[in-house]
Amino acid sequence: MRRLPLLLVPLAFWACSNEKDVAGISTVETENAFLIQIVREDSVPAVGVIARMRATDFVRDIEDNSSKANFSTEFFKKFTTDSLGQIRIDSLTIKEATIEIVDADEGLFTKISAKDIKSGDSVQYALEKTGSLRGKVYLPDSIDYAWVQVYGTDRLVKTDNEGFYEMDSLPPFEYDLRVIIGDRVVEQTAKIDAGEDASVNVRTFEPDSVKVLDFESTEAQFIIKELGISETGYMSSTDTSVQTTPSVETVPETRKDLTEFIGNAGAGREGNAIHWLSSAKYGNWSFYGIWICKEESPCNLSATDSIVYYARGKGVISIALETLGSSNTEGKTLAYDTLKTIDEWQRRVIKPENFKPRDDLYGNLGWEVISQTVTTISIAAYDSTEFWIDDVVFYGIKPSDFIDR
């Protein structure tokens, strides 16, 4: 939300000054009016847009899940901007209110107080691109869903039975959220930047495991559901010696779109899995990777008890944790696994002691170093290998051990 330099001349409107209770809210009538001009991003007045004013502590009743909330007992007023993009507030019957505008993909959200109106000031605001909010509310076993509300708006969403929620068309602002989980109420904040997606997870309860990969998305940008984040994975191959011809070949080719590597899990397993066939000479490999923590703030996953996944195939693969990014000392730690069954899915378990000791070969810095500064996870195939892998889960750590994106 951009507040632009003062452009308008204050206008004075006289009214009696007193305080009284209306619908349970203290009433403060003011002596002057407040003039607001709304403009587009190109500074052209926003004509005929609707601005809604509500009490800053207003939240929509969860019992009313219809498209129109009941405002009969709440402070609520609607304005339409005039030919100059202006609205005028003659008085404010509460101490503080919010003003919300959503017009197509642009919007405004701000707060106004009785003191503002009393001063007779006038301001100009520019509409900005709206953003979105999504995330996960971690639910106890006895709770099937939660409600997420935004103070000062009529925004109300019900999570799915895994606790995931989404809200779109939110003007830029740092919002106060109210989350209802059973008979418990949790307060949270969410900062929305212009045109950006924000993620806020609510952890009143945390499991002691995190599913990092499940490959159920049909798009290249996968949602890491347990973390409530989305990230684009990548496929590549590594040649560690000078070759005139490629020493790694994959099916599909690693330069192909990532979605081509995702398909039906098969062999009696439901859902999708990642799958490829690789042929590599010694010292070379193909791999899939994905960022799970920020470069500037890597995750400490040293408390991991085990990494569990399901796989089938034949050949040698590895699970690797990496520290990447110019701001870090780059390196990796990896554990090998040999698969021997194409037609049967098996539950595989890797523990910290299974990771290869530090030898600095190909950047291997060992578990003790890398597990404290993880940015990415990767899955690699060596020699001649065909395999499927699914549902990679970390045990012994919580979602809060990861960085919210």
Image: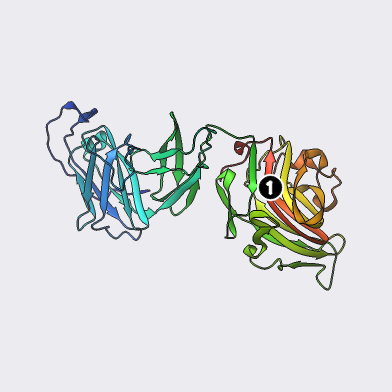
Total number of numbered discs in the rendering: 1
- Residue at horizontal 24%, vertical 27%? 24
Colour mode? rainbow
In the rendered view, tell whether residue 297 sits above or below residue 287.
Answer: above
Q: Position of residue 391 (x, y in %)?
A: 67, 48
Residue with the mark numbered 1: 392
Residue 90 placement (x, y as % from top left)? 17, 41
Query: Mark 1 belongs to which amino acid?
Result: Val
Residue 222 in percent (x, y) is at: 59, 54
Q: Nearer the viewer, residue 15 or 382?
A: 382
> Is 276 left or right of 155, judged from the image as shown?
right
**Camera-side residue of 292 and 269:** 269
Any part of residue 327 in sight? no
Give the residue displayed 34% in from the left and 46% down from the top: 109
Residue drawn at point x = 70 percent, y = 42 percent: 373
**Is the residue marked by circle 1 packed among few (<14), some (14-19), or many (20+) residues within 10 Å?**
many
Residue sitting farthest toward the bottom: 244
Q: Residue 16 location, x and y as percent?
A: 12, 31
- Looking at the image, residue 285 sits to the left or right of residue 37; the answer is right
